[in-house]
Amino acid sequence: MFKIILNNCCGLDVHKTWIYACVGITDNHNRTQYHEARFQAFSKGLRDLAAWLAKYNCTQVCMESSGKYWIPVFNILEKTCKVTLAHPKYTKPMKGNKTDRKDARWICDLFMCGMVKPSFIPPPVIRQLRDLVRYRTKLTNMITGEKNRALNCLTVSNLKLDDVFSDVFGKSARSITEYILAHPGETWLEAALQMRRRAFC
């Protein structure tokens, strides 16, 4: 029999639509009483879950990092509870009759005995900053990809502006590109001469 570390804790089995919760409360005689419930994974359901945990004075919560479903649960519960996020490989249940309620109790039992290795979750400000940086990186990569496609279009059209301009997307090169698009019968050299004449007019 494993030594009980947490006398009052909760295991959560989080899914897309539902959250299965199991609170385990151990008395001084090492007798554990379980309380189980199911909640919707929407905002109201998460608030109900937080209120249900408060009813049993449970502030220690453990759940698996399954997909992205754990994030809204974590965001709500971290305000009132100490939430431990565990990798699924550390909370994998034993083979047999597998149900969501049993999974929640299994997580609760492992957590109760201190057998869950927690994952590091940075504070909210760092998480928000990380999301913004990732999104900025994604947009930058998208812009780079679109520029490469545009440059390929110019190359296959024999408009080798990159041989003349250090920045094909600079003001001068863009002016020539726009002029060629508006006058498809002219070459880029003729377009450059036209642009030069305009500059001196």
Image: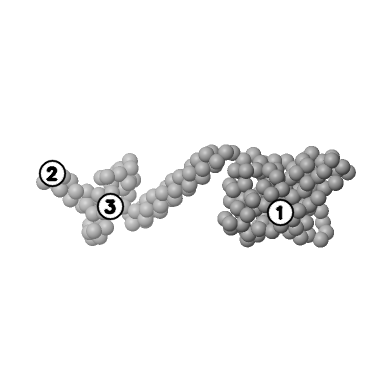
User: Separation of disc 2 and disc 1 at Cα?
Assistant: 76 Å
**Image quadrant in which the N terminus is located:** top right
Looking at the picture, how far across and down is residue 18, in whole percent? 65, 59
Q: Residues within 10 Å of mark 1 (few under 14, many from 20)?
A: many
**Amino acid residing under circle 2:** Phe
Tag in front: 3 or 1: 1
User: In the rendered view, would you say 160 is above or below 4?
Assistant: below
Residue for badge 1: 21
Q: Residues within 10 Å of mark 2 (few under 14, many from 20)?
A: few
Looking at the picture, how far across and down is residue 170, in whole percent? 30, 44
**Amino acid residing under circle 1:** Ala
Contact between labelled residues 1 and 3, with CB atoms less than 8 Å apart: no
In the image shown, does 7 or 196 lie closer to the viewer? 7
Which residue is painted at 37% across and 53% down in the image? Answer: 150
Mark with earlier residue (3, 2) = 3
Secondary element at image label 3? helix
Contact between labelled residues 1 and 2, with CB atoms less than 8 Å apart: no
Mark with earlier residue (3, 1) = 1
User: Separation of disc 3 and disc 2 at Cα?
Assistant: 19 Å
Tally the numbered discs.
Answer: 3
Which residue is painted at 74% across and 50% down in the image? Answer: 23
Secondary element at image label 1? strand
In the image shown, does 162 or 121 lie closer to the viewer? 121
Mark with earlier residue (2, 1) = 1
Q: Identify the mark at residue 200; answer none if there is no mark.
A: 2
**Is any part of residue 161 visible from this angle?**
yes
Residue for badge 3: 177
Looking at the picture, how far across and down is residue 127, in whole percent? 54, 42
Q: Is residue 52 left or right of residue 152?
A: right
Q: Residues within 10 Å of mark 3 (few under 14, many from 20)?
A: many
Which residue is painted at 82% across and 56% down in the image? Answer: 95
Which residue is painted at 75% across and 58% down in the image? Answer: 101
